[in-house]
Image: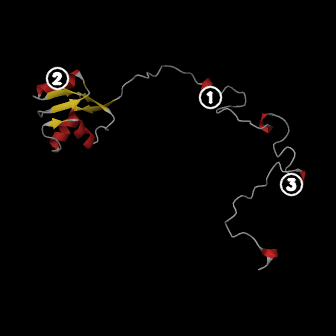
Amino acid sequence: MDLSNLQPAEGSVHNKNKRVGRGEGSGKGGTAARGHKGAKSRSGYSKKIGFEGGQMPLQRRVPKFGFKNINRKEYAGINLDTLQALVDNGVVTDTVDFAVLVATRLATKNEKVKILGRGELKAKLKISGHKFTATAKAAIEAAGGEVVSL
């Protein structure tokens, strides 16, 4: 080994690109491989996201309708038949509070819970929730249970 055959270790050099705009002698001086004139040749050029060369962009061609209510409150819906299944499996006996719902992964700790009226409830339960439908409330009380609003 001597100075005539020195080279970097295999895999240590990543950038094999030619540096542009570094003088005429480099072969990539002058326009620096950007071509002549036009927006793309200028410094500071950035194309708008979704720009289609002047054609009407997709996000403006597609019709828009409806509106999104920014004040909407989302609830995790839990039906009576789901609660009855918890009783049948022996997970709960008399009280269904928010901690139980989180533990059984029916809701997350940041969600609000709404009890819905699908199915039937045979067990006498004290159920806590943020909201109840009228049918769910009636079914819980008909089974001898209690409704607690959080």
**Relative to residue 111, is residue 81 drawn left or right?**
left
**Relative to residue 14, is residue 38 drawn left or right?**
right
Residue 138 bears which disc, if any? 2
> Of the residues under marks 3 and 1, which one precedes in the sequence?
3
Q: Which residue is mark 3?
A: 26
SS for callout 3: helix
Q: Is residue 23 above or below residue 129?
A: below
Q: Nearer the viewer, residue 4 or 105?
A: 4
Q: Amino acid at mark 1?
A: Leu
Q: Quadrant of the N terminus?
A: bottom right
Residue at image point 86% right, 38% down = 36
SS for callout 2: helix
Q: Is residue 117 above or below residue 108?
A: above
Residue 58 bears which disc, if any? 1
Gap in Å between the C-alphas at discs 3 and 2?
84 Å
- Does residue 120 appear anywhere in the picture? no
Label 3 close to label 2 by CB (< 8 Å): no
SS for callout 1: helix
Where's residue 16, x and y in %?
A: 74, 59
Packing grade of label 2 (10 A; few <14, some 14-19, many >=20) is: some
Q: Nearer the viewer, residue 54 or 38?
A: 38
Q: Amino acid at mark 3?
A: Ser
Residue at image point 70% right, 27% down = 55
Where's residue 78, x and y in %?
A: 26, 33
Label 1 close to label 2 by CB (< 8 Å): no
